[in-house]
Amino acid sequence: MSEQIPKTFRDWREARRFRAWQLKAKGWKQADIAEALGVTPAAVSQWLKRAREGGVQALRTRSGSGAKPRLTAAQLERLPELLSAGPEAYGFRGDVWTRARVGTVIKQEYGVSYSDGHVGRLLRRVGWSLQKPEERADQRDEEAVERWQEETWPALKKKAPKKSEPLSS
């Protein structure tokens, strides 16, 4: 029990585990340690066992490793190359990639299914950003739109009833 206790801790829970170790080294009983720290005797027992088996550093906060990635780094790196062929190369109509479409391509190419939300995270990871296509008609007449905005719209705005006037039906 002579291992070095760190001077700084990652969080209050970690500090509590190290305090339990210190109190045990001073000869305290597990039940008394649990009462002093506001935890169950079973928790103290687990902490002390961890420290005995793995050394006092085993009391450090461990970060969760998370699930193992289902796509390898090489597969993920190749994704932009696959998508550069365009949606029509995979049988989709139109020239827009959606997360659902990208998910379908990932399923076809690698046999891995992801939710649309996770597909979005994967796309951000490979450097793709959200793109919203402009919804404008191909036959749009920009000059006519500009004329309408400058001439017709102001006239319509002037004719709008004031809040105090009743609306007519």
Image (tube, rainbow, N blue to C red):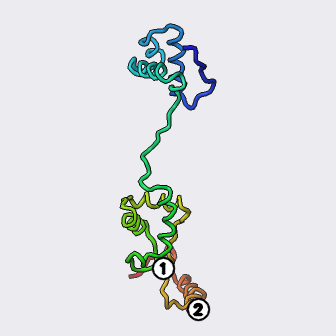
- The crowding category of the residue bearing disc 2, from other C-alpha atoms within 10 Å (few below 14, some 14 to 19, many at least 20), is few
- Above/below status of 100 relative to 21: below
User: Can residue 146 be seen at all in this image of the molecule?
Assistant: yes
- Residue furthest to the right in view is 7
Q: Position of residue 18 (x, y in %)?
A: 53, 21
Q: Amino acid at mark 2?
A: Glu
- Viewer-proximal residue among 109 and 87: 109
Q: What residue do we see at 54% from left, 65% from top?
A: 129
- Residue furthest to the top in view is 27
Q: Amino acid at mark 1?
A: Glu
How far separated are the C-alphas under marks 1 and 2?
A: 18 Å
Q: Quadrant of the C terminus?
A: bottom left
Residue located beneath label 2 in the image: 143
- Viewer-proximal residue among 55 and 42: 55
Q: Position of residue 15 (x, y in %)?
A: 55, 24
- Viewer-proximal residue among 148 and 56: 56
Q: Quadrant of the N terminus?
A: top right
- Above/below status of 68 relative to 115: above
Q: Nearer the viewer, mark 1 or mark 2?
A: 1
Residue located beneath label 1 in the image: 135
Q: Position of residue 105 (x, y in %)?
A: 40, 68
- The crowding category of the residue bearing disc 1, from other C-alpha atoms within 10 Å (few below 14, some 14 to 19, many at least 20), is few
